[in-house]
Amino acid sequence: MTVGAWREDRIGSALRGENPAVMRRLGSGFAVIGDVQFLPGYSVLLTDDPAVQRLSELPRSGRLAFLADMDRLGEAVERACGRMEPGFRRVNLEILGNADGFLHAHVWPRYDWEPEELVRRPVWLYPRQRWSEERYALGPRHDRLREAIGEELDRLAG
C-alpha cells in the first residue's frame, strides 16, 4: 500500500492491519487518532464493516456495541487529555456521516484556550485552513498523547 493510500480505504486498511492511525481494535470497530490535531487528542471510532453507512443499519445489539465503544473512546480521550493537555474542558461526541459514507463517530476534546467565538460552538465552524495546515497534521509529536489514549482504552476494557 502506498504512503497515505490507507486514507482511501480507512476501514479496509484497519482490517488488514495497514492503517497507521489505529490505536486499538474495539468490539465494534477501531479507535483511531484523527488526521488533524488542532484540538489535541481528536479521535474517531470507525465501524469494522465498511458496508454500514448508518447506525440504524446495525441490529440493536450492534448499535449498542458501537455506542458503548464510542463512550469508551470518549472517556479515554477525556482521561488522557485531562492529564496531559493544559486547559482541557470536556469532550464532544458526534455521529454525523455527512462526508464519509461509512459509520463513524468523532471524539473532539475541547479546551479553555480555544477562541472565545468558537469554544462553545461546533468544531466544524473552525476555519477551513485548520483542517489542512501542516502544523496541525498528525505526526510523531502526537505519539505521547496517542499512547496515553491507547493506555486509557486498555484500562477501560476491564
Image: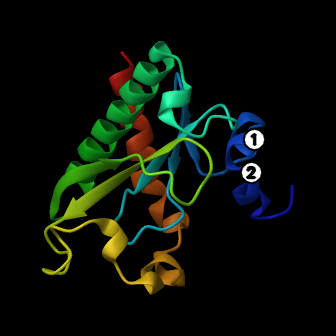
Structure colour scheme = rainbow
Circles 1 and 2 in contact, beta carbons < 8 Å: yes
When the figure is inspected, residue 110 is found, relative to residue 22, above or below; the finding is below
Q: Above or below — where is 4 with respect to 52?
A: below
| Residue in the picture at 38% in, 37% down | 73
Q: Is residue 46 found left or right of 78 in the rendered image?
A: right
Would you say 124 lies left or right of 2 here? left
Secondary structure at badge 2 equals: helix
Position in image of residue 135 (x %, y %): 48, 82
User: Could you tell whether 79 is left or right of 50 in the image?
Assistant: left
Q: Is residue 85 visible?
A: no
Residue drawn 43% across the image and 67% down it: 37
Q: Secondary structure at mark 1?
A: helix
Quarter of the image with the N terminus in it:
bottom right
Q: Which of 17/101 is in front?
A: 101
Three-letter amino acid code of the residue under disc 1? Gly
- Residue density around tag 1, few if under 14, some if 14–19, many if 20 or more, within 10 Å: some
Placement of 84 over or under 141, stated as above or below:
above
68 or 62, which lies in front? Answer: 62
**Which residue does the numbered mark 2 point to in the structure image?**
9
Q: Which part of the image, by quadrant, shows the C terminus?
A: top left
* Residue ID at (32%, 33%): 71
Q: Residue 13 placed where, x, y %?
A: 75, 44
Q: Amino acid at mark 2?
A: Asp
Residue extending farthest to the right is: 1
Q: Residue beneath label 1, please?
A: 12
